[in-house]
Image (cartoon, rainbow, N blue to C red):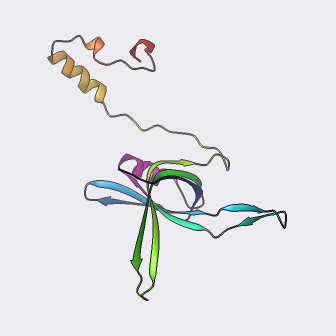
Amino acid sequence: MNDTNITVQGFVGGTVSLKKAGDTEVATFRLGCTPRYFNRRTGEWVDAETQWYTVNAWRGMARNVAGSLVKGDAVSVVGRLNVSTWAAQDGSERLTLEIEATTVGHDLRHGTSRLARNEKPQREEAVAAEAATAGEPQADAVRDWRSDPSAA
């Protein structure tokens, strides 16, 4: 599959919405990006036209995005670009740029942030229980690579 992956830095342009698409959560927000370039004739920086993207984040990232971002936040988004055209009510053709996000984060050039990790599901207990029923020693069933370097 040939996807177009992009990285866009910009600002959250409105409220982040969290909805369900069937059984799957999706967070959606608008991202505004205003490119700047240096005009050598005038010696000044010039803002180009603002580009607007609709960003969609799915599943667990959707909850994190909805709980972390507010209008005006500086963010970096990495994801797959989808371009679609559609006809408006007035008959004109419109273009929509959508990013299916694989990574979303605060742009730390504009402030500080602290990561609050999500709680992990109790998968380790389930793996240990399966190992016990299979006759394997429980101590070897699950090793955390962070606390046990030999598990890496």
Q: How many marks?
A: 0
Q: Residue at left 52%, top 54%?
A: 69
Q: Is residue 84 visible?
A: yes
> What percent of the width, then of the height, locates residue 34?
64, 64
What span is colored magenta in the figure?
A: 56-73
| Residue lying at 25% horizontally and 58% vertically, measured from the top left | 22
Residue 92 occupies quadrant: bottom left
- Reply yes or no: does residue 72 show up in magenta: yes
Q: Say if the magenta span includes residue 57.
A: yes
Q: Is residue 111 left or right of residue 129?
A: right
Question: Quadrant where the C terminus lies?
Answer: top left
Q: Is residue 21 left or right of residue 49?
A: left
Q: Is residue 127 above or below residue 82?
A: above
The residue sitting at 66% across, 48% down in the picture is 111
In this rendering, is residue 90 above or below 44? below
- Could you say where residue 20 lies in the image, as x and y percent from the top left? 31, 59
At 84% from the left and 67% from the top, the residue drawn is: 42
